[in-house]
C-alpha cells in the first residue's frame, strides 16, 4: 500500500495501519522533515483519531505537549476595539471533560506521528502521477523511479497530484488573496495586555474595512523539551510559548513587491498598518510578531464532489476537502479520515467495499463542515460564491 504525503493525515494513517498490521510505504516530496511550526486546533474528532492510531506512549506525549485547557472551549468573536461580540462553539462531538483536546504545535505533532515509523517514510520522493498496471497502481517520481502497490492513498494536500489525476474536474476555490501566518512570543507584557478572550480556544477579530485577525495561544501543559526528555527515543524540537496570528489584509499596498516574495520586514509593516487604529493591546500583539515567522499565503478551499467511482485510489484530508480555517477543523478532519480509513482497511471486508463506505462517510461528514465554516465569515462566503 502506498501513501503519498507525510503531513498530519498521511503520518496518522501510517501509524494506524502499522497498529493494524497492514504494511504501507509513505512518500513525501520534501527532502526531510520540514513541517511548519504553527498552531492546530484539536477537537474530540482529532484527539480520538490519534488515540485510535497511536501507540499509548505517543498518545500520552501528544496530550502532554498540547495546550493547557482554555478558559472556554470556543471561538470568541471581538471587534477591533477588543470588545466581545459573540462566541462560536466548536463543531463536532463533545470534548473530553477531564483532559480536553485543545491545540498543538504542528511541527511537534508531526514529529510525534513520525516516531517509530521512520523505516517506512521516504522523504525526497516527489510524486508526478500514477498509472495502473494490471491490478496494481504505480506511482512515478520526479527524476525517475516508481513505487508499486495494490492501493494508493493521496494525502498530499490541496495541490494533490493524486487528486488531479483521480478527479481532474474538482476545482480549488480561492477565498482570501492576502493572508499572513505568524507568531508573536508570549512575553509577560503581552500576556498582561491581551483581552481575557485570548484565554479561550481561539479569537476572531474583524474591523469595518474587512481586515480579519485570528489568533490562538500556545502554552503547552508541559514544556515540549521536558516532555521529549521524558519520552525516551522521541525527538522534539523545543517550542517557546507564543500567540499564533493569522491576518487577512484587504487590498494591501504592495508597491513594487510581490506578496509571496516580499521581505519579511515589509510584510510585518503591512500587518502593523492594517491594525493601526485597533485597540492598543491588539496593536501590541501585531507589533510583537517575529518577522522571521511570517508566511504569506492564499486561503483556499476544496469541496469534494457529491460522488466518485471507488477504485484502488483514494484520498484524505486537504487532498479531498481543504477547509477554510474559520472553525479550525482542517487537521481534525484529516486525522479522522486517517483513523476511519485505517479501521475500514482492517475490518476484514473486501477492500472496494471498505473504500466505498469510507468515501461515502467522508462526503457525508465534511460537506456540512465546509458549509458551516463558510457561514462564519460573510466576506469569505461572498468571495466563494462569485
Image: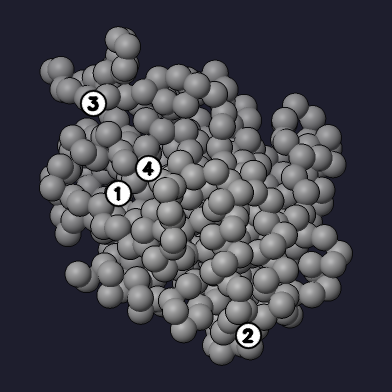
Q: Name the residue under label 1.
A: 320
Q: Mark 2 points at which residue?
A: 81
Q: In this view, does 172 lie to the left or right of 21?
A: left
Instruction: Give the foreground label among 4 and 2.
Output: 2
Residue 83 point in image, percent of width and height:
63, 88
Occupied quadrant, residue 289: bottom right
Residue 333 showing in the rendered view: no
Determine the CA span between mark 1 and mark 2. 38 Å
Query: In this orientation, which residue lies closer to the viewer: 292 or 326?
Result: 292
* Mark found first going from the N terminus, 3 or 2: 2
Determine the CA span between mark 1 and mark 4. 8 Å
Say few, some or many: other residues with alpha carbon within 10 Å of mark 1 (under 14 / 14 to 19 / 20 or more).
many
Q: In the image, what residue occupies the spot 54% across and 60% down?
A: 270
Residue 277 point in image, percent of width and height:
60, 79
Say few, some or many: other residues with alpha carbon within 10 Å of mark 4 (under 14 / 14 to 19 / 20 or more).
many
Determine the CA span between mark 4 and mark 3. 14 Å
Q: Which quarter of the rendered picture does the C terminus lie within?
A: bottom left
Q: Mark 4 points at which residue?
A: 157
* Mark found first going from the N terminus, 4 or 3: 3
Q: Name the residue under label 3.
A: 129
Q: In this view, does 136 lie to the left or right of 82?
A: left
Amino acid at each position: 500500500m502506498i501513501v503519498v504525503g507525510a503531513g498530519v493525515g498521511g503520518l496518522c494513517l501510517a501509524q494506524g495501519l502499522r497498529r493494524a498490521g497492514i504494511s504501507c510505504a509513505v512518500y513525501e516530496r520534501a527532502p526531510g522533515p520540514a513541517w511548519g511550526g504553527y498552531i492546530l486546533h484539536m477537537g474530540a474528532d482529532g484527539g480520538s483519531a490519534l488515540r485510535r492510531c497511536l501507540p499509548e506512549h505517543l498518545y500520552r506525549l501528544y496530550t502532554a505537549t498540547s495546550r493547557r485547557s482554555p478558559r472556554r472551549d470556543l471561538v470568541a468573536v471581538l471587534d477591533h476595539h477588543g470588545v466581545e461580540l459573540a462566541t462560536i462553539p466548536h463543531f463536532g462531538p463533545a470534548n473530553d471533560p477531564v483532559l480536553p483536546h485543545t491545540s498543538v504545535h504542528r511541527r511537534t505533532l508531526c514529529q510525534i506521528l513520525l516516531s517509530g515509523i521512520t523505516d517506512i517514510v521516504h522523504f525526497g520522493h516527489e510524486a508526478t502521477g500514477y498509472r495502473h498496471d494490471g491490478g496494481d497502481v504505480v506511482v512515478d517520481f520526479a527524476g525517475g523511479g516508481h513505487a508499486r502497490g495494490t492501493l494508493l492513498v493521496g494525502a498530499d494536500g490541496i495541490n494533490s497530484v493524486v487528486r488531479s489525476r483521480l478527479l481532474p474536474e474538482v476545482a480549488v476555490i480561492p477565498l482570501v488573496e492576502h493572508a499572513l501566518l505568524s507568531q508573536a512570543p508570549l512575553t509577560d507584557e503581552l500576556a498582561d495586555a491581551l483581552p481575557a478572550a485570548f484565554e479561550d480556544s481561539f479569537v476572531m477579530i474583524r474591523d469595518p474595512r474587512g481586515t480579519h485577525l485570528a489568533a490562538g495561544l500556545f502554552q503547552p501543559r508541559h514544556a515540549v523539551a521536558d516532555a521529549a526528555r521524558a519520552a525516551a527515543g522521541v525527538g522534539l524540537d523545543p517550542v517557546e510559548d507564543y500567540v499564533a496570528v493569522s491576518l487577512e489584509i484587504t487590498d494591501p499596498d504592495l508597491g513594487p513587491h510581490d506578496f509571496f516574495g516580499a521581505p519579511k520586514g515589509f510584510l510585518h509593516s503591512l500587518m502593523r498598518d492594517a491594525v493601526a487604529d485597533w485597540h492598543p493591546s491588539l496593536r501590541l500583539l501585531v507589533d510583537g510578531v517575529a518577522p522571521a515567522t511570517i508566511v504569506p499565503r492564499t486561503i483556499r478551499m476544496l469541496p469534494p464532489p457529491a460522488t466518485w467511482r471507488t477504485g484502488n485510489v483514494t484520498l484524505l484530508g486537504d487532498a479531498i476537502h481543504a477547509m477554510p480555517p474559520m472553525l479550525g477543523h482542517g487537521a481534525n478532519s484529516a486525522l479522522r479520515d486517517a483513523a476511519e480509513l485505517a479501521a475500514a482497511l482492517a475490518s476484514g471486508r473486501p477492500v472496494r467495499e471498505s473504500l466505498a463506505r469510507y468515501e461515502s462517510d467522508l462526503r457525508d461528514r465534511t460537506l456540512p463542515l465546509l458549509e458551516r465554516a463558510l457561514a462564519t465569515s460573510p466576506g469569505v462566503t461572498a468571495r466563494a460564491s462569485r
